Amino acid sequence: MAKTQTFDQELRSLQKYIESNENEDAKRQLLYPLFTKLFKDKFSIESGKNTHGADGYVEGQIIIEAKTNYTQWLDGFYQALHYKKKFGLSYNSIMVIAHEFCAIWKIKNLPEFAVVISNTADANMAPSTIGKENARKTAKTNMLLIKEAAQYWLEPKDLKGELFQGKKSLITETYEILKALTHLDSERIQVNKHNFIHAIERMKLFFETPIEAVHAFYSIIPYWDITSSVAENEISETIRIIGFSGKKFSDDIKIIPKYKKEFTKFIETQYVFTNEGSGLTVDYYFSRFDEVLAVIDPEYVKQHGIFFTDDNLSKFALWFAKNEVFESIHENYVVFDPAGGSGNLISSYKGKLKHKIISELQPDLLKIIEKRMKADPWHIETGFTVVPKTSTNQGLNFIEKNGTDYYQILEDAVLDSTKKPLDKPLAFLLNPPYKNTDENVVTREKSDAEYEINAEILALTGADAGKERYLAFLGQILNICKAQTQKLPKAKPLVMIFTPTSWLIPRPTYKPFRKTWDEHFTYLNGFITTSNEFFKLKGKWPLAFTIWQYEPNEERENKVKVLDLTHAKKTDLAFDWLDIDEELNPAVESFVNPFDFVNLDNSRGDIRNMLPELERKGKLVRQPRYDFSLSIKEYNKEIVSGFPSKNKDRHFKLLRKCGESDGSFIGFMDDNTPVRLKQDQSNRMSNEPDSVWFMLMSSFSSINLQQIHSGAANSRSYCAYDVVSSQALFSWYAISKSIFGRNPLWTNQYEIWQPNISDHLKVDWFALCYAFGLAENRCVVTKFEKDNPVEGAPEVWVDNPMSPNNQESFYRTILQKEIKKSTPSPSGRVGLGLDLATTIEAFYQYWNLNYTKGQILENVGLHEEAYFTYFDYPDFVTKDSGLIQIKKYADVNDCSDLLEKITTISEKTKLVKEEIYRMLVEDFKYFE
């Protein structure tokens, strides 16, 4: 597939040219990139051999005149025309460009008087002179005629005011200029799949609100062809688009009266490109409605939690449902989408779904869906029901009514539309809003996104879970299924739905609802994709499409296994979905086959279960996390936190109290700023280097934040004080660091779990984890001054618990002997941890023998580091300084010998990290 050429950089350059008020000579270089890329070697500049002084020239196509000010546009217009008479240049279009001005004319459309003036001018005079002379001869009324003859026109007043209130966006206008330049030889400019959103943006000018421009575009595209014209109804002050040589016409459209003439030119100089043979139909433009709305009103989209479904993903979901579950969804069910959005889901798979019911809360969206259906003969033939009728200018809130009342509305609508009863089970097919309503109410109200959820739904979901609108949709689906099966006892409604995965696992908040759901529905199949690959969503998380059937059973507990398609890209699903099944099915199956199924459940456990028990308040409890940054602090201008006194921002701007101002133990912020602490309730604090502290996030989604410190971290902190606690915490840390960026996307919904470590690999595993922690810790040696930040606070020396040079350190007393239990094997695999640890030990010996020599070295260039910068004493290093301190010392003081050894440590650390990952994936089957 050929790559589409983009002009973003060149159009930014053009935008700068139009914005700049410098003279044309100073900014002319900004003009050239677009024309050079567009016309390549056909484009000549002012100094070109055959240009004769014109600012730009493409033989047979266009001549460009650049001016400084808008007031010179008419000079430039006549100057451009004179190049044809004086030098015989050949072109069919003229472009004049200046500060906040651009206009393009086709020669054949110029007023006759302008052509006559140009043709009778003195051929011996320079174009610049003729331009000024002819401009003086032109009356104001004729100037207006020249302006109206322009194919494109932008002047300074167009760029004043407010967007959506008459002001044009210069970004949009540069794309409009590009569109004109790429169709110089065409009678009309093509509106196609690459530029139609920019066309809609330009249409905003003609309407009171942006959404009206969207409605207008989707109202006229079935009729906007190369024959289209605009017809005006003077009585109703509306217009219609007459297309297909007068055989078809659009609905009435109301535009701002003063823009009727400009709108007419906009329509009659362009056309919407379709190509039935290649599959580029009017429906293609409807399928991208999500992109249009996101550009027009992103706040509306955000507050409603609307994330429209990618067209190809919609088609794949229906293929998956049909081929994996039921061959005859279209024959045995009435498919219903209560949150129609752009209509991609409900309209995407022609030939597969028969009668359809579509509803939507927002009447604006419902009108678009109906337009889409009516523009397609297949939908008209097979039948569809829009609920409620768009003529009412109302939507239908899916979660505002009780299930019985809502089902009655559906029955009445189908009977009214088809003259037949709703006598088949419903197949819910939807991508509901994912919006969490626990946000700003005022903002939602402005977007009409604030509404009540029916009490019967909240009784199912619970108040907290009900804040997730997709869960409220699930609750209403359950209620409607109950209502339908009361009238059709043998019915077994289907549910095919896109949702986040939280309720499928389920996470704790959703457990009660999942229990109720499982009692009513049996799980059939599903797949997961990546949120921001197929949806206009911020963040990257797994999004599921799951299929369920209503079949009550109070004993049921569904096991949810889904096909993991999180590595799939949008382009992977670009199949010819209109192909016959014999051709389509093998192609899609070959795409699906390499992917595996994964279980979405809570069976994997939690790595915190590895932590040993310790005494807390006289009871044995599993080691709790420690946080010294918890309390909301009142601003009383007094020092209450344990930061150094010079750390004034944290003392007086931070909205939390951190530590204690007179504490006798030291912890660390994530940037290694020391903080005074007091003993915790589990007696884990120590001023000796006999324990090491970790900041450890429990969720896979935050594994990049893990750290190891000399003292307690500000939040989510745990202490390794013996072998058992070390096994848990160093494993937790090593797992996090080794899988970061490589863990499957679905794991981001989980807490990190304990690996299933084989007995014969335990020694090697822990040796690797300890060695990795030795290489990748942030431990330091520092000193907290006395009387800082308050009088009476003691001086506290902080040592490095991971120093191989200190016989009393945690590393020497606990970890070193555990690492040495691992011995090299012939393959070298088992010895990687021991090799790394031995290398670091040798490095520390070298550091002491050749640098510190058992002494404290002061003023060593570390004074700006967070663990020294807030104190008055000189910065220093010792034989036990942290590895990060020695690295910094080597960098600052250009110690090539140390840097070389540090490089070796880094290389061996990478090998250990890879081995940890390999053992997790291959030996422990961690993600299976």
Image (cartoon, rainbow, N blue to C red):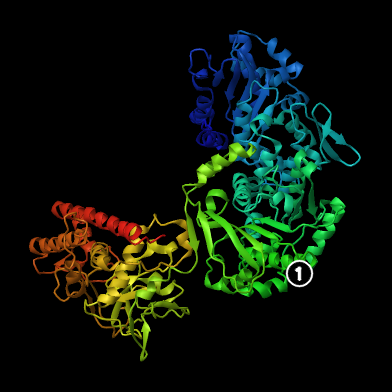
Where residue 483 sits: x, y (%)?
Answer: 76, 67
Residue placed furthest toward the front = 490
Residue matched to label 1? 402
Which amino acid, by three-letter code, is at mark 1?
Asn
* In-image side of 588 versus 393 (left or right): left
- The residue drawn where x is 61% and y is 50% is 317
Q: Is residue 642 above or below residue 705?
A: below
* Location of residue 473 by image quarter: bottom right
Tell me if I can see residue 133 in this picture. Answer: yes
Residue 83 is situated, as x and y percent measured from the top left of the image, at 60, 14
What count of labels does the image hold? 1
Which one is in front, 850 or 274? 274
Please report the residue visible at 37 percent of the width from the left and 78 percent of the height from the top: 626
Q: Is residue 442 left or right of residue 390?
A: left
Q: Nearer the viewer, residue 135 or 277?
A: 277
Q: What residue sits 51% from the left and 42% below the top?
A: 590
